[in-house]
Amino acid sequence: MKGISIVWLSETDLTNLNAGEGESNLIDVKKYKSDGMEFPYVSGQAMRYYIKEAIRRSLETTEYMCVPDDRGETCGKITECLLCDLFGFMRPFEGEERGGGGAQIRTSPVKVSPAIGLLPFEDNSVTDFLTRRHRAEKLEGDIVNVELGTNIYKCGLSVDVRRIGGDEFVDQAARTLKIKYDIDEGKRKKRIAKVLESLRFLTDYSKQARLLTDFTPDLICVSFQNVYSHRLQKLFRLDENKGKRALDIERFTEILKDVKEYSDNILLGSISGLVKNQQELEAAYKDLMGTSAVVMEPKDVIQKAIKYVDEHNLQ
């Protein structure tokens, strides 16, 4: 197992998960344009934050995850710190260390995509307002408009399994890059499990005091790959010819067939009512994976994925 790729859909109620630049009296939603229409999205930076905080909440007493300082720098101790190992870092060299220039850089083994809305924002949104109160002799306040929307978001995550718990170095004799592991395979598996488990408990989004939102997976696919690839991220797309909330089954079949060639196992899970053609989706999955393949609930997929990692060798 060299890589784990995950893609999921999550349906939200009215919310504003990631605000844009806005104005003094407007809290907008971050949007992107496609074919002349605007769709909401949540930045990759925000997605990383949600996952980090979910992992931080699940830490055991013997586990350590540093807090970035006022310059955003972390400890850089990948053997001890889950944050630095899983999400990478850049630490400038100081003083006489390495001549006082440059930086120590670790590329993040855990990579995430922005969460992109699949439904047009204009058709699924409203502008709400709130009052900002000021501390003064008179009770005064400003009216602030807040953009809110419902949508189905597509999210993605990839784990570079080989780099978890290890650091690259140049073998001068062979002139090749190698990875040296300073923690055992059991600890590496436990750190991967923390990432997988975090998807069940994503919570720390913006504006949750008055816009309580569930953003955990409603439809999820996980592939355990013997090569490192992000191909699975194109698995889910809405089919415009079948109306709203219907998945493109032809696209689903093509991508799954491709990924299956270098994957030891592919898991699929879904709740009911998310997409209109769920039975077609399940049939396409079973046609490719075998009649014994089962479409589970998302929580069962995550639990089975954690168990699969624990029972198989890492590379």
Image (spheres, rainbow, N blue to C red):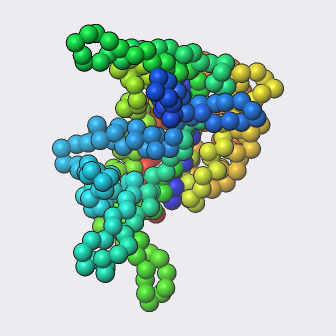
Total count of labels? 0
User: Of residues 36 and 132, which is closer to you in this image?
Assistant: 132
Residue 269 left/right relative to 303:
right
Tell me where residue 54 appears, x and y as whole percent: 35, 37
| Residue 53 seen anywhere in this rendered image of the structure | yes
**Picture quadrant where residue 282 is located:** top right
Residue most toward the right? Answer: 241
Residue 16 visible in this rendered orientation of the protein: no
Q: Residue furthest top?
A: 139
**Residue 247: x percent and y percent?**
70, 29
Query: Which of the two residues, 109 or 19, is positioned nearer the viewer here?
Result: 19
- Give the answer, above or below, for where 32 lies relative to 139: below
Q: Quadrant of residue 294?
A: top right
Residue 268 in picture, x, y percent from top left: 57, 35
Identify the residue at horizontal 31%, vertical 81% (top origin): 99
Q: Residue furthest left?
A: 61
Q: Residue, x 40% and y 76% (percent of image)? A: 169
Image-quadrant location for residue 144: top left
What residue appears at the point 77 percent right and 27 percent down from the top-left corner? 240
Residue 30, image x, y percentages: 55, 33
